[in-house]
Image (cartoon, rainbow, N blue to C red):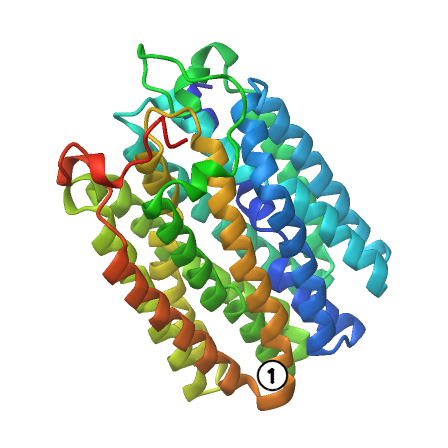
Amino acid sequence: MTTGRALDALNFFLADVRDGLGPYLAVYLLAAHNWDAGSIGVALAASGVAGLLAQAPGGMLVDALRARRGLIAVAAAIVAATCIAVPLMPGFWPVLLSQVVSGAAASVFAPAIAALTLGVAGRAAFTRRTGRNESFNHAGNAFAAATAGGLSYFFGPIVVFWLLAIMAVLSIAAVLRIPAAAIDHDVARGLEAGGARAASAPSAWSALLASRPLLVFAGCVALFHAANAAMLPLVGQKLAQTDAAQATALMSVCIVAAQVVMVPMALLVGARADTWGRKALFLGGFCVLAARGGLYTLSDDPFWLVGVQLLDGVGAGLFGALFPIIVADLTRGTGHFSAALGAIATAQGIGASLSVGAAGFIVVWGGYSMAFLVLAGIAVLGALVFWRMMPETSPDLTTAGSHARLSPKEA
C-alpha cells in the first residue's frame, strides 16, 4: 500500500471514529432507554467539554511528538473501548464517563491527521491533499451510516456501537501502514522545508492570542459550531418521536445524504481554494447553514427533514476542508501548526458544547422550531462577523500572504 493510499484508508475508516457517536447516541438513548432531551443534551455535551479541555494540549502534543502514527492508534483504541462500553452500561453516569473519555481521546485526531498530511504531502500539495482527505472522510461516514442503517433494521440501534468499534480497529491498521520515513516531521509542524527550524518546544496559548486573524477565525469557528452541532441530534430526536422503531435507520439516511454531498464539496475546496480563495468558500458555508436551520421548521415530514439535511453536506463539507488549510496559512513557517489547530478547535468545542447542551433545554422550553430558529440566527451572526473581519488567507491572493499570517516572532 502506498503512502497516499494509506492516508486514504486512514481517513475513510477513522471518519466515524473522529466524529463520535453524536446523533446515534441521542437516538439510542431516546428510543431504547427513554432519556429526556435535557439528559441527552448533557450526555452529548460531556464529550464536547472533554474534547474542549483536551484540544489545546493535544495540539501541542502533536507538535512535540514524532510518534504521531502511534498517537492516532492509541486514541482510536480508546474510542473503540468506550463505544463497546455504552450498550453494556447504559446508565447516566457510565454513559457520561464514556463520553468524557471518548471526547478527550478523539481530540488528537484532527491535528494529528493534518500534521501527517502536511509532513507527507508538503506545503505545495497540502490544499489538494486535504481536499482528498476530507472526501475520503465523508465517504467513510456515508459508508458507516449506510451500514449502520441497514444493520439496525435487523439488529436494532445497538449495532452502531459495534460498527464504530470495528472501524476504529481498521483505522489503527491503516495508520500503521504509513511509512515513518515518508513524514517530514519539521514540515508537519508547519516549518518551511529546508528553512530555519523553530524551537522544538510545543507552542503556548500566545500562538492564538498574538494574531488578530487567528483570533477572528477562532471566534467564527465557535459561532459556526454553535449553530451547527445541535441540528442533527435535534433532527434525530424528531425522527424518533415520529417512528421510534425506524429512527436509527432514518438518521442513517440523513447522515448518508449529507456525507454524499460533502465529498464533492471537499474536492471542490482541494481543487479551487488556492485560486478562488478561502474566504468566499467559507462564507458560503455559513450562509447554507443559516438557511438549513430555517428550513427545518417548515415540516416534520421525514422526507423533508432528509432533504434539508442535504444542505449540511454543503456547509459542513466546505468547513471541514477549509479549516486546516486556513490554519496552515496563518501559521506558515512558525512550527506551531498543530498547536494552533488545537487552540482553534478549543473554540470549536466551546461552540459545539454550548449548542448541544443548550438546544435540549430550548426544546423543553420552546419546542423544536424555536431551537432551530435560534441556531439559524447564530449562523447569520457568524456570517456577518466572518465577512466583515476575516481577511483572505490564501498566499496566492494576498500580498505574499503577509497580513494574514502569524509571524514566527508572534508565535
- Amino acid carrying label 1: it is Val
Image spot of residue 243 (x, y percent)? 63, 81
Image spot of residue 4 (x, y percent)? 40, 24
Q: Quadrant of residue 298?
A: bottom left
Q: Considering depth in this image, is 135 or 386 the residue closer to the camera?
A: 386
How many discs appear? Answer: 1
* Observer able to see residue 151: yes
Determine the residue positioned at 30% across, 52% down: 265
Circle 1 crowding by C-alpha within 10 Å: few under 14, some 14–19, many from 20 = some
Q: Considering depth in this image, is 143 or 183 the residue closer to the camera?
A: 183
- Give SS at disc 1: helix
Q: Quadrant of residue 355?
A: bottom right
Determine the residue positioned at 32% across, 60% down: 285
Is the C terminus in the top left, top right, bottom left or bottom right quadrant? Answer: top left
- Which residue bears the numbered disc 1? 363
* Observer able to see residue 11: no
Image spot of residue 106 (x, y percent)? 62, 42
Image spot of residue 25 (x, y percent)? 68, 62
Question: Does 351 sit left or right of 51 as displayed?
Answer: left
Q: Considering depth in this image, is 317 or 342 the residue closer to the camera?
A: 342
Question: Does 75 sit left or right of 88 as displayed?
Answer: left
